[in-house]
Image: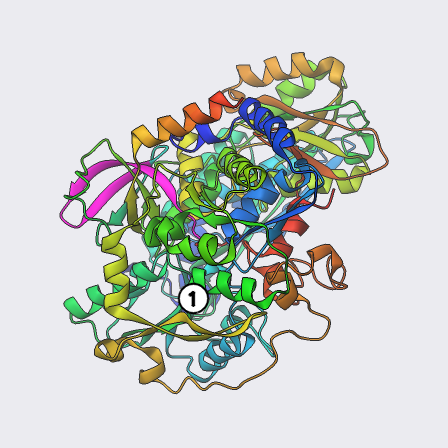
Amino acid sequence: MGEAGRILLAHGAGGKLSHRLIELFVDAFDNPVLQQLNDQAVLDPPGSRIAFTTDSYVVDPIFFPGGDIGRLSVCGTVNDLAVGGAEPLYMSASFIIEEGLPLDELERIVHSMAREAASCGVKIVTGDTKVVERGKGDKLFINTAGVGRVRDGMELGPSRIRPGDVVILSGTVGDHGMAVLTKRKGLEIDIPVESDCAPLHTLVAAMIDASRGGIRAMRDPTRGGLATILNELCESSGCGMLIEEERIPVRSEVRGGCELLGLDPLYLANEGKLVAVVDRDCATAVLEAARKNHLGRDAALIGEVLEGPSARLLLETSVGNRRILEKLSGEQLPRIC
Amino acid sequence: MIRYVDEFRRKGPARAMLRRIEDVAPRDCVSIMEICGTHTHSISKYGIRGAVPTGIRLLSGPGCPVCVTAQADINRIVEFSRRNPSVVIATFGDMLRVPGTFSSLEKERAEGADIRVVYSPLDALEMARRDPAKEVVFYSVGFETTAPTVAATVIKARREGIRNFSVLSLHKLTPPAMKALLDSGDVNIDGFICPGHVTTVIGAGAYGFIAKDYGAPCVVAGFEPLDALYGLYMLLLQLRDGRAEIEIEYARVVTWEGNKRAQEVMYEVFERADSRWRGLGEIACSGLRIRGEFSHFDAEKRFDMGYVDCDDDQAGCSCGEVIKGLVAPSECTLFATACTPETPMGPCMVSSEGTCAAYYRYERI
Amino acid sequence: MCLGVPGEVVEMDGDTVLVDVGGTRRRASLMLLDAEGVGLTPGDYVIVHAGFAIQKVDEQAALETLRLMKDIS
């Protein structure tokens, strides 16, 4: 397949080596649409309302505690669809591979994607591969697009948020951000935390069913963390929110790591969590339904939507004062001072 | 539960302490200054500044090592990184985005300079060890908590025969800055909240002259909200009683003598030198330079680091005055308009412990 | 200017110490602490700054401080 099993530029050239790669994908992702190897996937219309999303995955390192870039790409795509109330159906997967990537690493990632997609009931029906020169790409980038079916009458979005609604968080925050950080060179810190990378569509379905129409909006707090996503909800809805710090579940190891590095768990990425703004009257039912699902076992009611006119996100700290909670600016860098 | 942290962050005791502070607050206005970025951060984050009675002004002084670094020193390392892309520049995260006159380390990194963020100077030494073909320069800022860690790293480098590691020392000392502030008469300071971890190293006795010669009471406080509140309470009691003493709130780690071993290590490698502070100007014996015996590890001796004098504050930027507690961030014309964490005009906004960053993040309800 | 966090000493290994903060562990250097002089043993707590242990936490003093805080509450 290449010297010592590495990706060569020739793997992207369209010839024999490219075909070997395509075989890898087709065998792993295994579905009749993909097997046709057309330039496009022709699908039966999944219903009258389609959810469509796209994302790129550039995480470094590509293997981290609890997952890898492949698994992340499937879960991330599924979750973007799920928080819109969509049932995920199909995905595309485009690979931009840096010359020199060990082939067995690519295989592991592809098989990881296949397993995750199968367990989600999602088919990877089309894709692309490019190989770039060594140094021109960081091992592997994956771009995906996802298509899902949205039930008639399902309307989720920040415009539905009202004062008096409450905010539910499905579980602990900061796990993915910490897990990825610990593998970065130079941080030499042992945080026994795995990424929370997981597909949320069954959790979402359970919460929606229990809510009887009471869910206003949902988001998954990925890049930028919980604080950033809540800020976005405030901005988009024009409503302010008050979150209580003590109610936000954070694992002790994540807190410890954050204390050591001068980071804030509210700004670390999550890949298997969601926030839902719900009508206060259905909060108990939604919370119960969430907690019955393995991925929502630590679900908590963390705050509420305030009367206007300010659309600020406020945090009540562990000491009892209220302050604004800004969205992330710049990177979160480990502090020393 | 994180021990020795969570016990000092509790709602009930915090509220009770605020009530006690109201009880002992003086009738006249008092100005209390803290001189530690971690205190600035903590006091803002836990809303202490706004929660204390209005007669108590909590000022932030020159306690953020990034913020007190002179513009010329920032320009130096930025310029050096651009001219020497094959040299690894290791820096604490705080320095990465500080805007120099023309550029920043972050921008130079995007242009190809090899700039890496570290959590400990030992990480920078490790980089040098792993890649003997590359020169590693550690851009070293910090007060007396950090300086001993850098000194220990230099000693380790010599012990292990690592030849490609050097330090640009921009370290500064806390008591001389406090003295300069009091001597300048610019700011009225009735008492100091002294930095908990600097004092862990230098010992509370280092502030003796402030009580004796200037009659200003000092309390060495920890950084959790209950520590800051209790430290403030102790200070207010002193003011009420007309005392000017050095007291220790953070008794679980701070002593009168400090950490002798850390002091010895620090002065084995460093010696006092005059230093240029943003906002305070040149202060005698207020900084640390590497001693002659360790000149091999002194980046200024190994390389042409060039020093071009320049004004500290760029047009409209009030960092120099904010650092002295003369101007509150909200009084700077650029605050929250042209100057934000995304588009910082000066170090006080970009450093995570800068006064402006703290106010912007936590106090703009 | 001194982000220092208290951690429990889990293991002592020559001139380094393995410190646990809430379940997360990091090795810290003992070059700045007279470990023998302060009688440092596993189970004690130290303040860690920039990869170095800079002081042992005095448990009695901590309890005394908490008591003083409680007294004025």
Q: Quadrant of the N terminus of chain A?
A: bottom left
Count residues near mark 1 (Cα–Cα under 10 Å), then give few for <14, some for 14-19, many for 20+. many
Number of labels in the image equals 1
Q: Main secondary structure of the magenta part?
A: strand
Residue B120 in the image: above or below residue A304: below
Q: Nearer the viewer, residue B149 or A202?
A: B149
Secondary structure under tag 1 reads: loop
Whether residue B124 appears in magenta in the rendering, the answer is no
Q: Is residue B109 above or below residue A126?
A: below
Q: Which is nearer the eye, C72 or C9?
A: C72
Residue B265 position in % (x across, y down): 24, 61
Indicate the amino acid at tag 1. Lys
User: Where does the image place residue B116, in percent across and percent down from the top left?
Assistant: 41, 65
Examine the image and state in which quarter residue B171 appears. Answer: bottom left
Q: Is residue B176 above or below residue C12?
A: below
In which quadrant of the rendered view does residue A3 lie?
A: bottom left
Please give the name of the residue rendered at 59% of the width and 50% of the height, measured from the top-left corner: B190
Coordinates of residue B60 in the picture (x, y in percent): 59, 53
Quick check: B258 left or right of B226? left
Picture residue at 53% right of the left edge, 68% below the top: B106
Q: Start and end of the magenta stretch?
A: C1-20
Task: Please name the colour scheme applied to the rendered image.
Answer: rainbow
Residue that mark 1 sits on: B172
The reply to whether the magenta stretch includes residue C16 is yes
Camera-side residue: C23 or C58? Answer: C58
In this rendering, does residue B1 appear at all? Answer: no
Query: B303 left or right of A146?
Result: left
Give the residue drawn at x 31%, y 84%. B302
